[in-house]
Image: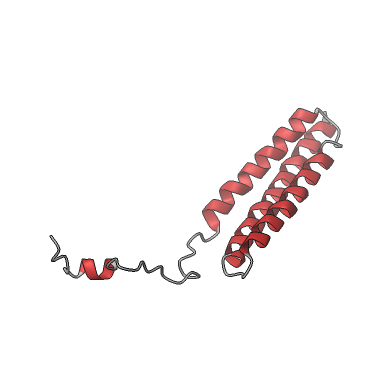
Amino acid sequence: MMDETLSLALSLVAGILLGAIFFGGLWWTVRHGVLSAHPGLWFVGSMLLRITVVMTGFYFLLGLPGDGWKILLAGSLGFFMARLAATKFLPAPLHALLPPIRHAGKPSAEKSARGNNHAL
């Protein structure tokens, strides 16, 4: 009984760590990949690396003593907890990194806010 409880606690912590690696890596990739000359390579390479790390981690969790489904459930719960933490605590806006998008032939939002809507 004690071995299974310890295994479940360890798999929960491992799931949190794997989730932090996965979602932290995703956040880092998005922050740096959009400014890269080859963003496709960044995103595909990062995805393959992050999935490989997480799948390997969950594979090793199955080696812990106890029921495999309970171990995977606890690890998945930890992974989900890391996802919630990442969406709450990591900054999301990228508008500071990207240049403003201007559409040719369309008035900007700034002009229409000033009252230059004489086309009505």
Residue 84 pos. (x, y %): 57, 47
Q: Is 87 placed left or right of 26 in the picture?
A: left
- Residue reaching furthest to the front: 105
> Which quarter of the image is occupied by the C terminus?
bottom left
Marks counted in the figure total 0
| Color theme of the render | secondary structure
Task: Give the quadrant of residue 10.
Answer: top right
Residue 49 pos. (x, y %): 74, 54
Residue 17 pos. (x, y %): 72, 51
Residue found 61% across the figure and 64% down from its top? 33
Residue found 41% across the figure and 68% down from its top? 101
Image: 73 above or below 51: above
Between residues 56 and 76, which one lies in front from this camera angle?
Answer: 56
Between residues 35 and 107, which one lies in front from this camera angle?
Answer: 107
Image: 93 above or below 15: below
Residue found 82% across the figure and 40% down from its top? 59
Q: Is 26 placed left or right of 53 in the picture?
A: left
Residue found 63% across the figure and 61% down from its top? 29
> Which quarter of the image is occupied by the N terminus?
top right
Between residues 115 and 80, which one lies in front from this camera angle?
Answer: 115
Residue 12 pos. (x, y %): 72, 41
